[in-house]
Amino acid sequence: MAKPLLLDQEWLERIAGQVNGLEYGSVLITVHDGRVVQIDRTERKRFDAASSKQQQDQAQANGDKLRAVKG
């Protein structure tokens, strides 16, 4: 049978801190022997295609271009 999960206030605050401000994404909590040992946060950024096209058009009108830089 699985051990009961032990969460103290510190872990609850850590988890809440990772979830707060997350618009799109996921929070993965890893548990070993009934204890939280790791928190992974994966954040996604979503962009509206229409506003992205509008920003691109404005940048081109201003002469701004994305250039590759050799390093």
Image (spheres, rainbow, N blue to C red):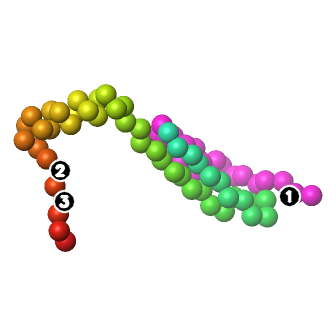
Residue in front for this viewpoint, 29 or 36: 29
From the viewer's perspective, is the residue at label 1 or at label 3 nearer?
Answer: 3
Residue in front for this viewpoint, 64 or 25: 64
Image quadrant in which the C terminus is located: bottom left
Sooner in the amino-acid sequence: mark 1 or mark 3: 1
Look at the picture and state if 53 lies above or below 12.
Answer: above
Image quadrant in which the N terminus is located: bottom right
Rounded to the nearest angstrom, the CA distance separating label 1 from label 3 is: 54 Å
**Dot 2 alpha-carbon crowd within 10 angstroms: few under 14, some 14 to 19, many 20 or more:** few
Image quadrant assignment for residue 48:
top left
Rounded to the nearest angstrom, the CA distance separating label 2 from label 1 is: 54 Å
Check residue 9 for magenta coloring.
yes
Residue in the picture at 17% in, 68% down = 70
Among all residues in the image, which is located at the extreme bottom? Answer: 71
User: Does the CB distance between marks 2 and 1 fall below 8 Å?
Assistant: no
**Residue that label 1 marks:** 3
Is residue 10 in view from this perspective? no
Q: Name the amino acid type tagged 3.
A: Ala
Q: Name the amino acid type tagged 1.
A: Lys
Check residue 38 for magenta coloring.
no
Q: Which residues are magenta?
A: 1-23
**Residue that label 3 marks:** 68
Residue 66's tag is: 2
Look at the picture and state if 51 lies above or below 35.
Answer: above
Secondary structure category for the residue under label 1? loop
